Image (cartoon, rainbow, N blue to C red):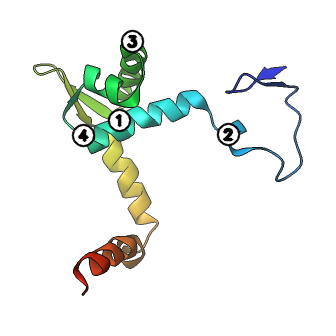
Amino acid sequence: MIEGVNGSKNSGTKRGRGRIKKEETRVQTLDRGISVLEMIARAHPISLSEISRRVELHPSTTFRFLETLRQRGYVQLDDETGLYTPGLKCFEMGSAFLVTQSLPKVAEPYMNVLVERFGE
């Protein structure tokens, strides 16, 4: 038996298309780690305690996510200040995305917001 994120158990057998609920397909641990990374991207530099508070995770859990992300290069820790910032791997991931996209396609949603805001 395999235990799901929500505590449900199943035999691991495949289900028919369209029958799996969205919350059953999400991996809670990965979701939490991405939340930590997104918080750093939005509010950097930022401390462990502030990240923990904002993403509503225990500081020890947040620390483990941060250490994993730091070791993989996704976040950097300033030893003097104790603050976290995005790491080089974030830039690499963004660059990999941009290589697959045309500039007009990437810019279009942002341009639409500007047009709505400024009416031009």
Marks 1 and 3, how far apart at CA: 19 Å
* Residue 70 visible in the shown view: no
Task: List x then y, in percent, for residue 79.
Answer: 15, 19
Task: List x then y, in percent, for residue 56.
Answer: 41, 25
- Horizontal placement of 98 versus 31: left or right? left
Name which quarter of the figure residue 51 lies in: top left
What's under tag 3, amino acid-wise?
Ser
Q: Does 56 appear above or below 34?
A: above
- Horizontal placement of 26 versus 91: left or right? right
The structure residue drawn at horizontal position 87% and vertical position 40%, both measured from the top left corner, is 14
Given contact means CB atoms under 8 Å apart, are the residues at marks 1 and 3 in contact?
A: no
Q: Quadrant of the N terminus?
A: top right
Name which quarter of the figure residue 94 lies in: bottom left
Between marks 1 and 4 in the image, the one whose residue lies nearer the viewer: 4
Residue marked by disc 2 = 23
The structure residue drawn at horizontal position 36% and vertical position 56%, both measured from the top left corner, is 95
Marks 1 and 4, how far apart at CA: 15 Å
Q: Does 109 appear above or below 30?
A: below
Q: Which mark is residue 74?
A: 1
What's under tag 2, amino acid-wise?
Glu
Q: Which mark is residue 43?
A: 4
Name which quarter of the figure residue 80 lies in: top left
Query: Counting other residues with Cα less than 10 Å from the Cα at mark 1, is it few (<14), some (14-19), or many (20 or more)?
Result: many
Give the SS element for disc 1.
Answer: loop
Query: Counting other residues with Cα less than 10 Å from the Cα at mark 2, is it few (<14), some (14-19), or many (20 or more)?
Result: few
Residue marked by disc 3 = 60
User: Which of marks 2 and 4 precedes in the sequence?
Assistant: 2
Give the SS element for disc 3.
Answer: helix
